[in-house]
Image: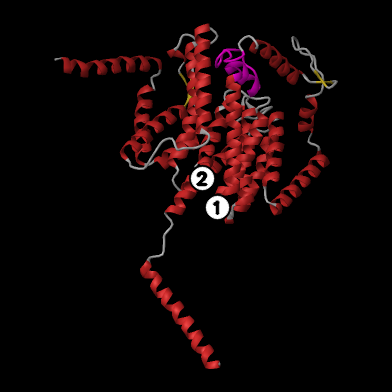
Amino acid sequence: MVKNGLLIAPAVFFCLVLGKVISVNPYAPLIIIACFLLFILAFIHSDWAMGLLIMAMLLSPEIDLGGLSKQQDITIRIEDLMIVVFMLGWLARIAVTKGLTFIRRMPVNRFILFYCIVFILATLKGMVMGNVTPVKGLFFMFKYIEYFIIFYLSSSIIQNEKQIREFLKMFLIVFVIVDIYAFFQIGHMERISAPFQHGSEPNTLGGYQVFMLGILLGLLTQDNMRQWKWPLMLLAAFTLIPLAYTLSRASYGALVTMYLTLIFFSKFSTKTVLVGILALLLILFLAFKPDFIMERLVSAVTPEYQENVPTVKVLGLSLGASPSARINDWVYLFHQWTRQPFLGFGLTGTRFVDGQYIKVIVETGLVGFTAFILLIVTIFRQTLKIYKNTKNGLYKGLAIGFLAGHMGMIVHAISANTFIIIRIMEPYWFLAGMVMVIPYLEKAAVSTAPSIDPQEQKPYMRNTQFFLNSSKNLAKGIG
C-alpha cells in the first residue's frame, strides 16, 4: 500500500503542475513533447542536436512565461529549453558510454567556477537584503550558468576535426542568414537589429557581426579554404554594409580592435595583406565619408541638451547626450558600489546600465570583478597559447579568429553589456569550447595515429638492404 502511494504521489504532483502550466500556456503540451524528442536526439545524435542549437541561437523566438510570476514578466527563448534538454540528453549518453566526460580539465575551469560562486553568493545576499527580486535573480543566475553549460557541451561533444568543420559551417550559414535579414532592414528602420529581437538592439547585432567577422577572417588568414575562399571574402565585405547601418559606435570600436588584433598576431605575409586591405578601406572611407556614419561619430562629441542629463566634459571636450547619460550612470552606480564594495548588490540588484565592467563591479563587487577579469584574461592567454602551439591550419585559423573576436568584445563591453547579451554570448561560449578543446583533439590525433606494422616494415628493410649491398658491389667492381 505504501509502495503504491509512493508511486502515485509523484504522478499526482506532475499532473497538478502540468495543469497549472497548461492554464498559463496552452502550447505547453507541444513544448513538452518537443523537449522529449530533443532529448532523444541529443542522446542518439548529439551533432545534429548541436546543429539545431547553433541555428536557434540567432533564429529562435521568445516564449512569454509572465503568468507564472505575479512579480514581473519572465521571457525565455527556445534555445533556453534546448540547452537544458540537450545537456540532460548528453549526460545520459555519457552515463552509458565509456570514455566520455562532461567537464574536461582546462585552465579556464577554475575561473568559471570562481565567477559562478561569486555571482551566486552576491545574488543570494541581494535577495536577503531586499535588493534582488528572488524570481528575477534566479532566472538571471540560470542565464549566466547557461552560457557555461554551452561551453562544456561544446568542449565535451567535440571529439575530432570533422565536427569542428561541420559546426563552423553551421555558424557561417546562420551568419549569412542574419546578414541578409539585417541588409533588408536598411531603409525601413532607423537602426537595424538581429532577427526576433524585441525593439531596436543595434548594439547586439553589431557585436555579433564583429565577433563572427573575427572568426571568418581568422579562418581566411590561416586555413586553406580552397573553393570557399572567395565566397567567404565576399561575405566579409558584405557584412560591413549592415554593420555600418547599426550606427553602433561600440561596434565600430570593436571592429577596429578586432582587426588590429588579427594584424598583430598574424604571420608577416598575412600581416602585409591585412595592412594593405586596411589602408584601402581607410582611403575609401575618407574619399566617400558616408554621411550617416560621420553624423553618428560626430554626435558623440556634439553637446546636445537633454532633460536631466548634465553634459559631461572629457579633456575639455563636451560629449553628446548619449555618452553623457551613460557616464553619469557610471558615476552614480560607482558611488552606489562603495556602499557594498566586496560582493555588490547581486544580479539585477541595481538599475540598468550600459557598460559591462561597471555592471559587474556594482552587482558582484570587487571580488566578482576580479573573478570576471581573471576569466577573460585566462581565455585570452589560453587561446593565444593554442594558436602558437597548433600546426593545424583549421585550428590555427579558429584560434586567431576567436582571439580577435574576444578582443573586440572586450572593447565592445565598455559601453554595452556584451558578456551577458544572449545573441552574442551563446555563439561566443560555444566557439570558446571549440577552441579550448583543440589540445585534446591534437593529443588524441597523435595517440591514435596509425603505426607501421612490423610485417610491412620487412619488405622496406629488405629493399633498403638490397640497395646498400648493390651499391657496395658496384663500388668494388669499379675499384
CA–CA distance in space, label 2 to label 1: 10 Å
Q: Which residues are magenta?
A: 341-366
x, y percentage for residue 474? Answer: 51, 89
Q: Looking at this rendering, what residue extends furthest in the top direction? A: 130
If the image is split into quadrants, where does the C terminus sit? bottom right
Kindly identify which numbered label has been placed on residue 392. Answer: 1
Is 338 positioned to the left or the right of 161 in the image?
A: right
Tag count: 2
Residue 382 seen = yes
- The percent position of residue 465, horizontal first and vertical second, equals 44, 79
In which quarter of the view is residue 205 placed? top right
Instruction: Say what amino acid the circle numbered 1 marks.
Output: Asn
Q: Residue at x 66, y 36 (%)?
A: 242
Q: Residue furthest right?
A: 316
Residue under the point 58% across and 41% down: 383
Helix, strand or loop at mark 1 = loop
Q: Is residue 343 magenta?
A: yes
Residue 109 is a magenta residue: no
> How many neighbours does mark 2 have within 10 angstroms: few (below 14), some (14-19), or many (20 or more)?
many
> Between residues 407 and 303, which one lies in front from this camera angle?
407
Q: Residue at position x 36%, y 43% from top?
A: 99
Residue where numbered disc 2 is placed: 438
